[in-house]
Image: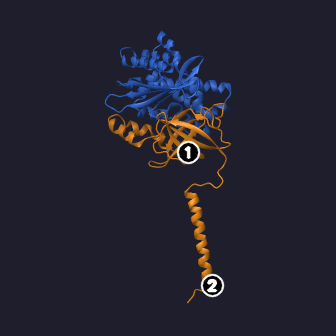
Amino acid sequence: MYASRTTQLIVGVFGLAGIAALAVLSLRLGKVGLFPPPSYTLYAGFDNVAGLKTGDAVEIAGVAVGKVMAIDLARYRAQVAMRIANGIKVDDEAIASIKTSGIIGDKYVSISLGAGNRPLKAGGTIRQTESAFVLEDAIGQLINSSGSSGAAAGGKDQKQGKK
Amino acid sequence: MRPRFGIYAIMRNLLRAAVVSAAFAVVAGAAAARAADDPMEVVKVVVNQALEVLRDQRGPLHDRQEKLRRIVDAHFDFTTMSRSALGYHWRDLDAGQRADFTRTFTSFIQDSYLSKIQDYSGEQVDFGRATQPDPGYAQVMAKILQPGKQSVPISYMLKQRGGQWLIYDVTVDEISIIANYRNQFNRVINRNGFASLMADLKNKQRQLAADLGTPHAHD
């Protein structure tokens, strides 16, 4: 015995909705922008990027303004290429820091703007940087210096990211 | 509203604050002036002579602090440091406010580190390499060797002004003085305004100066 026409129709609609949801999901997960916003590239060199990945966020005052596009090794330092949305001006005294959201959270690049008069042009380099906070190093230092006031842990609070 | 200046937290916790004060210090001398055209030499002179003052604990504390202050004045660019520490807020200030801030911040940061010189406990500095990211700017990497502990990376940012290389920022263990203050000042200014920041900074500076036994608003 066959199912009624209505039931067949409902199954078909659900099937299509499922496929559409999968398509949206894969676009989202793959971070494929169908229409990427216009942007320009800036570079920054770090001593240690410790787990920063391509695709991680670039933030100014906590607002996402771009993404990490590539991380390369240049003369034993990490060279990070970032796409910054057009219209966001980064001056030549800005400082780029690698921060962590939460204790084991994702890394991101935070840019604090300076008082510079010249905005960096496309392809420019942010001169001053702060490298990633490495938890293992901090713990090592904490253990080594446990006699003298828990140095590493406290002094690093500010590197722990958003909060 | 009492915004906290992380300098206290940092100083209490960062045991190598003493060594940063080494960075802040140079014994005035003819040799120092000669070296002004090479960033690496400038930093070496500053650090070595500062370490000398830190090690020699015979003289009265106050004399040693003043010795350090003189050398710091000669080799640090506190104008750039102040300007950069304020970040984009600097653009909104008029000339009078800028001068006032620069004077207060300079005294504040000098006194902060000078009040810590007794924490020195035998640290040494091992110099690495120097790079020039942009014309007129240089970075010198080094390591602080602490007896019986892990070494700590330190780097000096220098800027060329009038043919002379001057230090305008020091990054200890990936925490830069400028970046640290920029974040804090930013927060205070956005929440309470520039006047409130100045009042707080002046208060702290007076306290420090009183502890040091020097008259306030040194310049």
What element does badge 1 sit on?
A: strand
Residue type pointed to by label 1: Val
Query: Residue B81 or A72: which is nearer the viewer?
Result: A72
Residue A113 seen by the camera: yes
What element does badge 2 sit on?
A: helix
Q: Position of residue B36 (x, y in %)?
A: 52, 16
Chain A shade in the render? orange
Q: Position of residue A123 (x, y in %)?
A: 62, 37
Q: How is the image coloured?
A: by chain
Q: Is residue A151 above or below residue A38?
A: above
Query: Residue A131 or A30: which is nearer the viewer?
Result: A30
Question: In the image, which lettered chain appears blue?
Answer: B
Question: Which residue does the image show at 67% across and 25% down from the upper left?
Answer: B95
Q: Which residue is mark 1?
A: A68
Question: Which residue does the image show at 50% across and 32% down from the upper left?
Answer: B176
Whether label 1 touches label 2, CB < 8 Å: no
Earlier residue among tags 1 and 2: 2
